[in-house]
Amino acid sequence: MDYTIKNVTIDDLKKLQEISRETFKKTFDPFTKPDDMAEFLEESYATQKLTQEISNPDSRFFFLMVDGEVAGYLKINVGHAQTEQLRDNALEIERIYLREKFQHQGLGSVLFNYAEKIATAEKKDYLWLGVYEKNIVAQKFYAKKGLTRVSQHVYPVGDDPQIDYLLVKKLDH
């Protein structure tokens, strides 16, 4: 499968917003009450919030393009943009989101490997992320990528205090 990875810019805001809402809803709808989902999608992917995230030099977004179509995206954070300071000198994968028709084709690995390549090139000691406790498929995927669970935190979706497991991988230089 031919693909390209491109940096997301402010010009891509509407597409990023659309894909974010589509993929989050599709993945987490079975576990989330409709009111909580609606509130989360509105607030977390609001134009102003995404504009700030795209403009933050410690956050980067990348679209995965397949045949000219956005298949999904990756969001990584370093420094103060990380959702928490889990480890010193770390890179956080905040999001690997793939649209449904592009799932189970190895594209999640493409995005994960891209993030790991950046982390290694930037001499980070750790790669980490949070994964929803009920997302067993993602947990198995990350275990195969060498991440291990070290902690957990509450990830509020609307009024629902969901639990994310925090996974870490020590990187070799």
Image: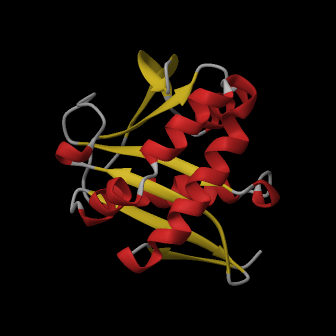
Q: Quadrant of the N terminus?
A: bottom right
- Which of the pair 120/78 is nearer the observer? 78
Horizontal side, residue 42 vs residue 128: left or right: right
In the image, residue 18 sits, relative to residue 44, either above or below, namely below
Find residue 127 and report its image quarter: top left
Please, which residue is most extreme toward the bottom here?
Answer: 68
Horizontal side, residue 21 vs residue 10: left or right: right
Instruction: Give x and y (percent) for residue 34.
Output: 67, 30
In the image, residue 153 sits, relative to residue 64, either above or below, namely above
Colour mapping: secondary structure
Instruction: Give x and y (percent) for residue 21.
Output: 59, 51
The number of discs equals 0
Horizontal side, residue 154 vs residue 32: left or right: left
Q: Residue at x 23, y 56 (%)?
A: 58
- Which of the pair 29/131 is nearer the observer? 29
In the image, residue 89 sits, relative to residue 23, either above or below, namely above
Q: Residue at x 34, y 53 (%)?
A: 49
Q: Residue at x 54, y 30 (%)?
A: 131
Instruction: Give x and y (percent) for residue 74.
Output: 50, 57
- Which of the pair 33/11 is nearer the observer? 33
In the image, residue 119 sits, relative to residue 9, either above or below, namely above
Is residue 120 visible in the rendered structure shown here? no
Q: Residue at x 59, y 62 (%)?
A: 18
Is residue 142 visible in the rendered structure shown here? yes
Instruction: Give x and y (percent) for residue 85.
Output: 23, 31
- Which of the pair 122/67 is nearer the observer? 67
